[in-house]
Image (tube, grey):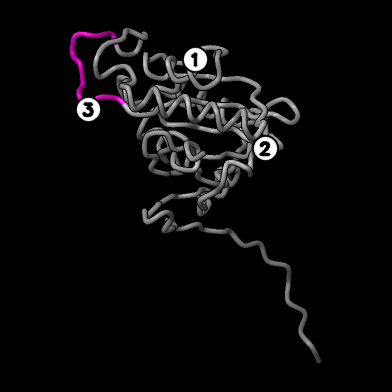
Amino acid sequence: MKRQLPNLFFVLLLLPTFIVSCGKTIQSVVKPEDERRTIHNAANMDPEVVVNGGFVLFFRHTSRDPIDPTDLDLNNGECGPGSDLNAKGVNEATAIGAKFKALNIGVDKVYPSLTCRNIHMANLAFGFFTEAKKELAGVYWDGVHAELIAALQALISTPPARGKNTVLLGHMGMIKEIYIGVELELAVGDAAVFLPLGKGGYELVGHIKKEKWISP
């Protein structure tokens, strides 16, 4: 006589996951109630992947002089050496914009951080920006602010207009578990590719390196 096992309810315990991507080790703790931000192996992609739109592209600004000015209001767009793009960064931003045009990549909205270099990059690459956002300059936040984190997550999770992409221009250290539940280290000019799911949901699906953007 066969015994019939009762239905059981299992609780899935997700342990820290270590993923090697682009030579980096990515660590993420994914809570069961927060599966919408599951870590992905952010594979290297080509810009052609985003031609049909539907993504949120988080760029780290292009090159600047490696100094940190102390007499400028960095979080309110004041420009100066170290806060603005240098000549190399200007060329990189211009080349990124040229790649968008060459591939006919649609852009819906462009949100730079409040810093000079990201506003400059927006104008060079795209010729406009929608609105400068404080939540994209986490490196200059005074502590961890729940309202800024929520605003950042909202930007990433909001789908763009059909056939287009949203562009976010931010800083090193923004793709962090503490902010958005996933981690990815971006070099200057790199872009993280997110698939926005709406209602606070998104997935990190790829990583487009600067070299792919600026190549002819």
Quadrant occupied by the N terminus: bottom right
Q: Which residue is mark 1?
A: 123
Which secondary structure lies at badge 1?
helix
Label 2: how many Cα within 10 Å (few below 14, some 14–19, many 20+): some
In this picture, residue 200 sits left or right of residue 133: right
Which residue occupies the extreme bottom position in the image? 1
Q: Which residue is mark 3?
A: 66
Q: Is residue 170 magenta?
A: no
Label 3: how many Cα within 10 Å (few below 14, some 14–19, many 20+): few
- Name the amino acid, label 2: Val
Residue 170 percent location from the top left of the image? 43, 26
Residue 113 percent location from the top left of the image? 43, 18
Between disc 1 and disc 3, whose residue precedes? 3
Q: Which residue is mark 2?
A: 51
Give the label on residue 94, or none: none
Residue at 47 percent of width and 36 percent of height: 214
Residue at 42 percent of width and 34 percent of height: 189
- Name the amino acid, label 3: Pro
Relative to 110, is 35 above or below? below
Between disc 3 and disc 2, whose residue precedes? 2
Q: Which residues are magenta?
A: 64-73
Q: Nearer the viewer, residue 205 or 209?
A: 209
**Structural distance between the alpha carbons of marks 3 and 2:** 33 Å
Q: Nearer the viewer, residue 23 or 48?
A: 48
- Name the amino acid, label 1: Asn
Which secondary structure lies at badge 3?
loop
In this picture, residue 37 sits left or right of residue 182: right
**Structural distance between the alpha carbons of marks 2 and 1:** 21 Å
Relative to 2, is 30 above or below? above
To which quarter of the image does residue 138 belong? top left
Which secondary structure lies at badge 2?
loop
Relative to 76, is 36 above or below? below
